[in-house]
Image: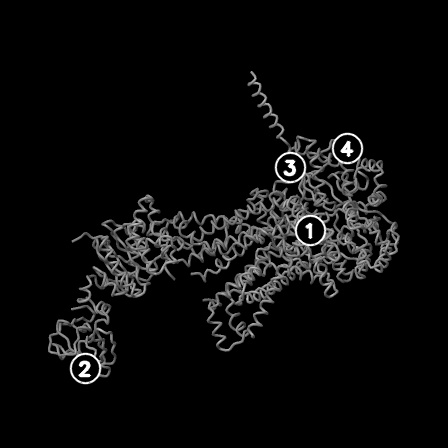
Amino acid sequence: MKKILMALMAVLTAFSSALAQEKIHITFWHAMGGSRAAFIDRMVQDFNYTHPNIEVKAQYKGSYRDTLNSAILAYKQGNAPHIVQIFEVGSQLALDSGIFMPFQNLVKPGNYALLNDFIKPVANYYRIKGNFNSVPFNSSNPILYYNKSLFKKAGLDPENPPKTFDEIVDACVKLKKAGVRYCITWPLHSWFVEQWIAEQGALLANNENGRKARATNIYINSKPMYRIMKWWKDLYDKGYYAYSGKPEDWDGANNLFVSQQAAMLITSTSDVTILENAAYEHGFKLGTGFLPVPDGIKRNGVVVGGASLWVTKGHPKKELEAAKEFLLWFTNTENEVRWHKGTGYFPVRESAVKVLKFERWFDKHPAYRAAFDQLLQTIPNRATQGALIGNFPEIRTIIENAVQEILAGKPIKAVLKEADRKADQALKRYNMSVR
Amino acid sequence: MAEAMITLKNVNKSFGKNKVLEKINFSIRKGTFTVILGASGSGKTTLLRLIAGLDFPTGGKIFINGKDVTQEEASKRNISMVFQSYALFPHMNVRENIVFGLKIRKVKKEEIEKKLSTVTKMLKIDNLLGRKPSELSGGQRQRVALARAIISERLICLMDEPLSNLDAKLRSSMRKELKSLQEKLNLTVIYVTHDQIEAMSMADEIILINNGKIEQHADPKTIYENPKTIYVAEFIGTPPMNIFNINLIKNSNIKLPENAEKAGVRPESISFERREIKIGDGEIVFCEYHGSETIYSVKVNETLINVKSIEGKHTIGEKISLYCNREQLLFFNREGRKL
Amino acid sequence: MERHSLYKSKLTALMFILPTLVILIIFLYYPTFQTFKMSLYRVAFLGLSKQFVGLENYRYIFSSPEYRKIFLNTAIFVVLSVVISLVIGLFLAVLANQKIKGKTVFRLLLIWPYALPPAVAGVIFLFLFNEQSGMVNYILKHVANIALPWLSKSYLAMGVVITAFVWKMVGYNVVFYLAALQNIPKDIIEAAKVEGASIFQTFFKVTLPMLSPITLFLVVTNTIAAFFESFTFIDLITKGGPADSTTVIIYSIYRDGFEYFKTGLAAAESVILFICVVILTLIQLRVSRRMVHYEK
Amino acid sequence: MRSNILKISVYILLTISVFIIAMPVITAFIFSTQTPAEIFSYPPKFTIGKALIENYKTAWNMYHLGRYILNTFFIAVAVTVGKIAISFLAATVLVCFDIPLKRFLFIFILLTLMMPTEIMIVALFDLVTKFGWSNSYFALIVPFLASATGTFLFRQHFLQISPAIVDAAKIEGAGPIQFAMKILFPMSTNVIAALTVIEFVYVWNQYLWPLVIIRENSKQMIQIGLRMMITGQDATNWGIVMAGAVISLLPALAVFLFLQRYLTKGLFLGSEK
């Protein structure tokens, strides 16, 4: 009798463990390397632990460009990941590629509250034609970081960073005199150009930044653009601005700032944590301020940078459900707070902001505040909503090439005109191919 | 008369348009040592390869032991072969080289060992078994190649100029060894060479080929004394037989055969002293002193005649008369056939 | 030519050669053919949409200044890097071929970059040539008090990429040149010396001509490597910048094909590159036939 | 006297060259031992830093270089062995078999020298994708199994082997397969060793193809692993990246150093006995 019972027990355990192994596997590709990858891995582990029937596997796929490309290639290859992290300017491309499904379709209308909880500027960017196609996850915008210790040394007010282009130049004169090697740095990246365009209330593409209808014309040869380039080139020519020489080299800029060769750095809010730690390690005080803007214009605000999470088509319903469950968990209030504190990316939910305010987080960590205030003060309009352009990654390359040519000494107007032509032509070919 | 071991019937071989062998017919008896002799390019090696089954005739038939093997692969013909370059497998040591064939044929291990020890002792290479071919001298390689051929105990052994890569001294001792080995094992050997001394000293029979055709097939004595053609006469002997126009001796009072165009006489048969026939008066233009004999080149009219003599006293420039006996003269017709 | 006794079994022959043929047909001939075909289409997102456009892709490539610049970049990169890596390779091989002590060690230390992964070279160069924190500028600053904008000036960036490529390629060239030098019969060199030729005369009049077959071979292999292996260096060090001044054809193929998803355009570029390779190979065949008399 | 000066200058030149060639790797190694603060200290330090073990550990574990090395090693061995076997067999047919169209076959194989993978990458991507290999080692192995270089080298080598060897093997009763396996193959050790170096290094250094075709990180190859270390949005820790560079260099270098003396022997068959 005992034996039979034992056997029965054994069968039952085997059965239940077989059931337990019947997990739903979800793959999640992201572009967060290094310490952020570790952070994501920890969050995913927590999810897997609390959701025994779902197994999420997170994979780092390189840069944002690489990750998006990889996803499209994978879809074509028939093994697309369920969830992909895609940078903001990849949104139209992602839509055009036709390999993703609108996230909103996964959410029952009764749960729309979860979607309405996203803060305005973020929702503003990702809601395309009234639809949430993806779940905002890591949002950021550019802010000014500065080295308070060097500021003090140069006789500048360490609590009052420059706010405009001219103020930057003024600060540079003093910093240079004080023996700072370079005054300011930021990665040679089209993202900053896009931000400065938005700050001036200007558009980057026709058809209301591609929001009303598909964009067919890129505005590179424009006054706002000229303002940016002129200032940039002046800084560079005077030896105030430095970059590593490689486009989109985030590290290069960070390293210059961290090694105190440059007193100011313009980069993403998402680097707050990293830079705070680095400043501590290298023995200087870190300050943060708003993105400096051209003089004589009204500060219009920034475009929400960062990335959102997309769900690919063609998976069984069970897996889509699991993916949805993971995404809602991953971006829930608690995790948003955790993510913000761990990295510096914004909390994208109103509720998370409330929690942080309640905890007096920003008072205790002033470095995190600039980004947040800058976002909240942004005026919602077509300019700050950001452009939707199908081949935005390619347009970015064209803009970055133009900047490099300008810095190398070519006349700004001619370069912008040529870049404008190139961009329009590339967009025309792109639009033809997706039609 | 022993049975025919190998028979070729009307064998032809051509490479493209180039006819290498034409209408080859012969039989070889069991246990004989047959030498295929010929200048380079005469087709002798091709002939051997046809017998081996490494090439296949364009026409005709080949029989071994009464069986038609014309289209048989080499491995099915029950023969062994020794190559001019020895063709030892460079990556195998002596032992592996020798027993390679036996292993391929899956002979039992103990049997292989037994045979190996017999053969290597016989050839005195039992102390070299672990060495690679590159560590052996020419003579040792030769013995290994022989051992590889012998160990298979096949009755027919084909040899393609096996001694030509050895130095002169070693070559002559190997000749004797080869011959006695053949007799001891009662092998049927077909031996290809361009060296008439090898042929004369070892062969039971010589097949002399020229330009893809057999000139003469006979034992060495017949070949030497009774060459069928001028080609054979001139090929054999050092120096070769003197061939001159019949006019040279027309005035001698002897009866010449009808149609005779040329006459031939061996250098050792010519004498400086009066004999039945006077070949002519001449002048010594060259002499080669060999110790036991001297070879004089004598210019008679416009013809150069070699004389082999035990007398070494004559010198260059000396005027001298040449003679020979009637039975020492051979006569050939216009086509070079002996009359 | 010596005659071989051949095996006749057709079945075995087929069995032996079939794997090679099958793989070559499926993975080399067929895709090459497909590339030609694809170059006549406008393809978006790797075939998610596709439309026949004839020679439009080629017309676009040849009429666009951007692509003309890419061809020019490719030519500059290939010519400079091949010439430099061959000259340095030959120079080092001649040095290492002298009768000196410890030459085996020297040789090893000269040829090891043969095994150097281009990605490793790329990553290291990216780090070394960083304009502000790189080692090269650090040393320059100390020695000559200058710092060069290595990656933001077009010709300097091209120079960095070429240097990385040459570094990787030199080992390969030394291997071949050393072997070729050792194959030159000593008596020829000695004969030249006896005739009273100086070291330099001997080198230029005797050694160099004797090396022409291997040089030709190396020109072709180096050129093909420059066409294709350059991808790694450019992807890692410059990403084609600054302002597309280091974008070569293979990098453009990758970018158009797998980043911008203009598959048809990428295929057309591939066809153009393929034609270059074919022409090069044909030249090699012709010239090498004329030069055989230098070989033993 | 003059020759002495010459010799000394040869030594000096060689030493300088050797040093310049090794310089980047030495620098990489030094920085691979430093912490970020040490690396970006100004002026830089040229001594072994504090993070030697930590950097290598991080590169190996956190950046999964261990996994990539294992993958690449497996793929390199598979391609090298397969390629050598397959091209050996093809060359055997081209030299030792009597078959029609031999010359045509040889040219057919040789022509593929003009078709490197990179040139048809778009179409090959499509094809391999259709086979559904994008997440498997097959994609990195199968297309590379046949080789014109290998076939060509083996063929040249076989043509130098005395024809009598074939004859002898036939007389001894070896069939074509036995001949290939027991005679030809062991006689080709130089070519095999040379090809091992060439192919191993080739596979080890693969970059564009795995970048394009492989989606699953756990199947990725080492050089792409190295690439992923520097393309993130994070601040790169160059010490760890340099450690990664050193790690991804060593195996190919080891194989090369181990077999390099066969390289010239195998490539220059003409000088062989």
Vertical relation: D22 (above or below) A347: below
Q: How far apart are labels 4 and 1 at the CA level?
A: 47 Å
- Residue placed under numbered mark 2 in the picture: B320
Q: How far apart are labels 3 and 4 at the CA level?
A: 23 Å
Local crowd size for mark 1, using a 10 Å CA cut-off: few (<14), some (14–19), many (≥20): many
Residue C56 appears in view: no
Q: Quadrant of the C terminus of chain B?
A: bottom left
- Residue placed under numbered mark 1 in the picture: D239
Chain bearing mark 2: B
Mark whose residue sits in front, 1 or 3: 1
Local crowd size for mark 2, using a 10 Å CA cut-off: few (<14), some (14–19), many (≥20): some
Asked whether, in this view, residue B115 is left or right of residue C34, the answer is left
Where disc 2 sits, the SS reads strand
Q: How far apart are labels 4 and 2 at the CA level?
A: 136 Å
Chain bearing mark 3: A
- Residue placed under numbered mark 4 in the picture: A112
Mark whose residue sits in front, 3 or 2: 2
